[in-house]
Amino acid sequence: MLAIRGRCCVERGYGAAGQRVAPMSAPPRGRFITLEGGEGAGKSTNLKVIEKLLRSRAVPYISTREPGGTDLAESLRSLLLNPSSEIVPLSELLMVFAARFDHVEKVIVPALREGKWVICDRFVDASFAYQGGGRELPWSKIEALERWLPRLARPDLVLLLDVAPGRGLTRATRNRKADRFEQERAAFYQRVRKAYLRRARGSSRYRVINAGRSRRAVATDVSAAVGGLIDRFGGGR
Ligand code: TMP
């Protein structure tokens, strides 16, 4: 995580000697980037690619993840991923959103307000994909919860790393035991992928990146998308 660069703000009005001083300008808000995709799509690797790019362009940022990012959300994550947890789909949806509201209010929104960019490993699109697609909960229930999120917590850029489910899952569980989601069947992951692609369709905020290619090719596309955002917003300050 990078420390925010020092900045001096002046209150609107008059200085001690009665001279007019420049009005205080709020820092430009940071930008919000989320990384999405099925298991083993390469999110962690590409999160590092984004961090490196932001550092090279002197953009202050934090990186975080969902479910997680706060003590409460990390506790909920442990429950959600534990293969011995028995959780009905609607409770699962409410748990991921309970974790999200905590994370958004304590971490994401404050960072964006301070002008920091936020890179988040999964966000609301994962709920549409896993609880909507995978668990087949009605889209409208998830949309209702999504509407409770503050406007500021709307991602500026969603990088969807798209990979055939079987391939990604093998990659993800190569060196460890499968978690509660990873124990799902192939059909679950086909629905997850379809739901992600449905969310991305027709929206300019999404970049669907074919993650079945070489690391380098994927990283090049990720860097191009994030570089475009930096060029557009000038690093948030
Ligand atoms: P990962 O971030 O390590 O891939 O694992 C998190 C798991 O949580 C992943 O299997 C997807 C799942 N998940 C949901 O089901 N809904 C959500 O809203 C989020 C953020 C994650």
Image: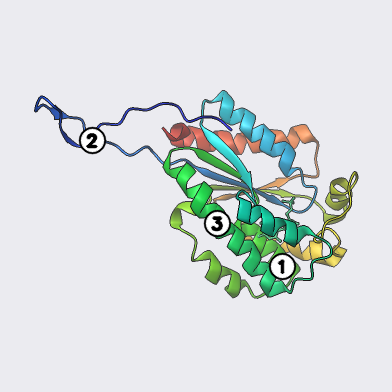
Left or right placement of residue 65 versus residue 85 in this view? left
Question: Residue 65 placed where, x, y %?
Answer: 65, 48
In this view, the mark in front (2 or 1): 2
Question: Residue 26 placed where, x, y %?
Answer: 33, 39
Q: Which residue does the image show at 78% across and 35% down from the upper left?
A: 215
Q: Secondary structure at mark 1?
A: helix
Name the residue tied to disc 2: 11
Tell me the quadrant of the picture where the N terminus can be found: top right
Q: Secondary structure at mark 3?
A: helix
For label 2, being within 8 Å of ligand 1 is answered no
Q: Amino acid at mark 2?
A: Glu
In this view, the mark in front (3 or 1): 3
Depth order, front residue of 67/155 = 67
- Displayed-image quarter of ligand 1: bottom right
Left or right placement of residue 40 versus residue 158 in this view? right
Name the residue tied to disc 1: 133
Is the residue marked by circle 3 packed among few (<14), some (14-19), or many (20+) residues within 10 Å?
Answer: some
Q: Are marks 3 and 1 in contact (CB under 8 Å)?
A: no
Label 2 or label 3, whichever comes before in sequence order = 2
Q: Amino acid at mark 1?
A: Gly
Label 2 – label 3 distance at C-alpha: 31 Å
Label 2 – label 1 distance at C-alpha: 49 Å
Label 3 – label 1 distance at C-alpha: 24 Å
Q: Which residue does the image show at 67% across and 33% down from the upper left?
A: 49
Label 2 or label 1, whichever comes before in sequence order = 2
Can residue 197 be seen in the rendering of this structure? Answer: no
Is the residue marked by circle 2 packed among few (<14), some (14-19), or many (20+) residues within 10 Å?
Answer: few
Name the residue tied to disc 3: 102
Q: Which residue does the image show at 70% across and 38% down from the upper left?
A: 46
